[in-house]
Image (cartoon, rainbow, N blue to C red):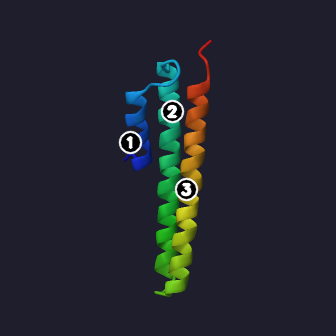
Amino acid sequence: MKSAYELAMERLEKESPSGPPITEEQKKEIAEIGEKYEAQIAQAKIMADEKIASAMGDPQIIQQIQAEMAHEIIKLESERESKKQKVRDRTSS
């Protein structure tokens, strides 16, 4: 499942492509990066859900766990996009 950010970036890229087209190898590497980070994001959500379940309904603890999860997801999404961009920026030799 793609985020709204990814969908918007795809639309922008279609409207005004930047740089040379990427190779099949780069596409494969970008897909692998995406899969790796989607798995990490899913894991972070599962861990947060487990912590919330053990919080025994304490709203402050639940809010803190949700904030930590949101921060972790933002960090992972940023890392993912950075790594994808590095692959896109590489010139094929």
- State the SS at label 3: helix
Q: Which of marks 2 and 3 is in front?
A: 3
In the foreground, 7 or 63: 7
> Mark 1 vs mark 3: which is more N-terminal?
1
Q: Is residue 88 left or right of residue 11?
A: right
Q: What residue type is labelled 1?
A: Leu
Task: Give the percent coordinates (x, y) of residue 22.
Answer: 49, 21
The secondary element bearing badge 1 is classed as helix
Q: In the image, what residue occupies the spot 49% across and 50% down?
A: 39
Q: Earlier in the sequence, mark 2 or mark 3?
A: 2
The first of marks 1 and 2 along the sequence is 1
Cα gap from disc 2 to disc 3, whole angstroms: 18 Å
Q: Which amino acid does label 3 sit on?
A: Ile
Q: Mark 1 points at which residue?
A: 7
Q: Where is residue 12 in the image (x, y as percent from the top left)?
A: 41, 34
CB contact under 8 Å: marks 2 and 3? no
Q: Residue at 53% across / 38% down in the picture?
A: 33
- Which residue position is annotated with label 3? 74
Residue at mark 2: 30
Question: Secondary structure beneath disc 2?
Answer: helix
**Three-letter amino acid code at disc 2?**
Ile
Q: In this view, does 76 lie above or below 85?
A: below
